[in-house]
Image: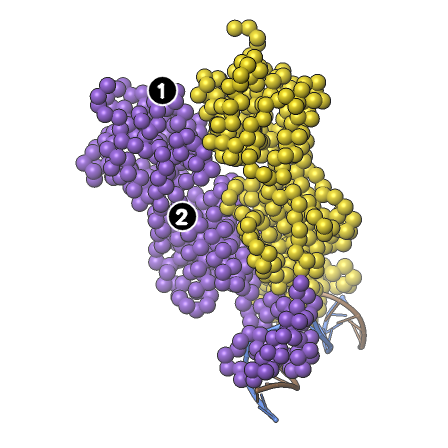
Chain colours: A yellow, B purple, C brown, D blue
Amino acid sequence: MSNRTIGIKDVAVAAGVSVTTVSHVLNDVPYARISPETRSKVRSAAEQLGYGPNRLAQALRTRRTGMLGLVCEDIATTPHAGRIILGAEEAAKARGYSLLIINTSGSAGRASRQADFGALLDRRVDGILYATLHHRKVEVPASLGSVPAVLIGSGAGESKVPAVVPDEEGGMRDAVNALLDAGHTRLGLIDNADDVPSSRQLVQAFRATLDEAGLDGGAAPVESGVPKAQGGYEAALRILTPKHPADTPTALFCCNDRMAMGAYRAAAHLGLSIPGDLSVMGFADQELIADSLHPALTTVELPHYRMAAWAAGLLMDALEGKIDLSRMAAGPSVLGCTLMVRDSVAAPAGPAT
Amino acid sequence: MSNRTIGIKDVAVAAGVSVTTVSHVLNDVPYARISPETRSKVRSAAEQLGYGPNRLAQALRTRRTGMLGLVCEDIATTPHAGRIILGAEEAAKARGYSLLIINTSGSAGRASRQADFGALLDRRVDGILYATLHHRKVEVPASLGSVPAVLIGSGAGESKVPAVVPDEEGGMRDAVNALLDAGHTRLGLIDNADDVPSSRQLVQAFRATLDEAGLDGGAAPVESGVPKAQGGYEAALRILTPKHPADTPTALFCCNDRMAMGAYRAAAHLGLSIPGDLSVMGFADQELIADSLHPALTTVELPHYRMAAWAAGLLMDALEGKIDLSRMAAGPSVLGCTLMVRDSVAAPAGPAT
DNA sequence: ATGAAAGCGCTAACAC
DNA sequence: GTGTTAGCGCTTTCAT
């Protein structure tokens, strides 16, 4: 449809005006004083010719490309990255920006990371979004200083860069409270054995929430395993077969959905029905899994989409001078996690039977 | 590190040469005749100043942006899209290209689709990759004609556009043959009730493969359900409780991994162990699920990464004049699917007992 | 072996 | 109200 070999000049000739006039009407330049007739002449000429602006030339002149660089870690590993990409893309598209995407391995070295940012800078992106999946703190390359940036999923270290992170602790508390509200008093935690920062924080929040509810958080059983189904299975088995049967938890909090999947298997193995005999709570919603389990897993959704959309919005606001990024850089902004209530949580079985 | 306000001019001044010379040495222009000393002078000046070329200006002049547009359907829905993005991104990065990404809803209207392509064209991408997840045929917008394009995951309709698609039929045959090789003679198929093109093809290939093996493909039980775990569960239940117990399949082919997950539950419900009493084969590897099931699901991997990488490679070859795209447009190129052997398939239980 | 200069398509002073 | 013109940073033809 639109013919990209047509330039503003062709439109000018066709409309019988100068390029300035064309530029002014097509860009709705506020101070331009152009008669309505000329305006429509230009508009229809442009339409007729299928004119599309050359954003490159515009960018060269205005020094704004309207492109945002998204550096995203381990794109293919989880659907979470997809939510981040989508959140950023939709926010960008809605405001006329485009997303230049770069994948970076979580384990990439400094040099390769530098090169990735360099490619983005060479293309003169207006700003950069840096999304990481598992870090608490991230050190941004110094070269990034030349362009505004916002971190997604982890806070900045030394460097003062605005960031948006999920309120994992709050999500955990909500989840535990949901379990408590359902009437459970003996909860177990299945933890990720990998030493990721969020894990330690999660255990703490778990115990603290129990303490606050008048239960003994310190006494609650915590078992960890590799963050996969098998690890969850083994941890659940350990937690569900304690020395004193009276202590057996009636609810399990699993720090990720794959481990919850393993917990389901452990429950089946022990003849425990979910949620009748055992309630299971997941974390970091992997819809694919949570929704496929039976009963469907109640879990906490990490706000990947919202974080990315928010970060992109912030970045664009800064680029357009609506806000001052340096004032946002104090601490990371925190976005709440949503409890996705499905069918794996119920009241504990009565002491009868 | 690199300072993006430095231009070729600054380098020229610093090196005491003209911009032409700088351009020539930095771009390794073949016909340029420049003394080694001058070359190194220029190089070190550039290095010193942290010069990075302004790709925009280059692009404006050379009419090549080095950007590929990737229009990807439903990015966030499945991890498959992640594989596609990654395949395209890594192929592009390896050759100095960048990926401009646009999400498009599978259900988007013509206008919105047009706008998406328009945005890419306005930015003067050199070529376009169009990835769809569930179509057999796709009609590309006419506006796309102005720039080379390659389709990923579906063939072109009327318009002659090169495409790369997975060999789902071959994957299906391999999978069925693996079941046959294990000694199964009574296979059942769990089909996707949604009317997606691949579904009909899969059923056909299933029956044909059985026929070729001397079994009666027409007689093999096929049940369908919604393409989720629950649909798989229900279909499996129906298929595993036939009128004549002697006919009960000893192996189930599930046309997607979520349905296979449901089949696992049906098996458990019926007291059938996998793979002892029942072998289960999945399709369209969702590693997250296949790997988390117990036993791990043997399934067929769709080559999303390879398709995208191949498509990007083809596109770049065309852009660089290495091949002629119009000669690739005859029919779609077909990439094989890999059988991911895990633990859900074994020989059928002996007739004894 | 090196440099001057003309654009690529557009925007924005500034002139009329 | 509308047009002229000087660049944005680079590549490339043509001189020297």
**Residue at position x 67%, y 82% from top?**
B16
**Callout 2 amino acid:** Pro
**Above/below status of B317 relative to B211:** below
**Residue at position x 62%, y 44% from top?**
A135
Residue occupied by mark 2: B303
For this rendering, which residue is in front, A165 or B208?
A: A165
Q: Residues within 10 Å of mark 2 (few under 14, many from 20)?
A: many
Locate residue B284, reporting x and y percent: 40, 40
Answer yes or no: is residue A321 visible.
yes
Residue B271: mark: 1
Q: Residues within 10 Å of mark 1 (few under 14, many from 20)?
A: few
Mark 2 or mark 1: name the one nearer the start of the chain: 1
Does residue A178 appear to the left or right of B258 in the view shown? right
Locate residue A73, reporting x and y percent: 57, 48
**Above/below status of B127 relative to D11:** above
Residue B352: mark: none
Locate residue D2, reporting x and y percent: 73, 70
| Residue extending farthest left | B214
SS for tag 1? loop
Q: Chain of mark 2?
A: B
Locate residue A266, reporting x and y percent: 47, 23
Cα separation, mark 2 vs mark 1, equals 35 Å
**Callout 1 amino acid:** Gly
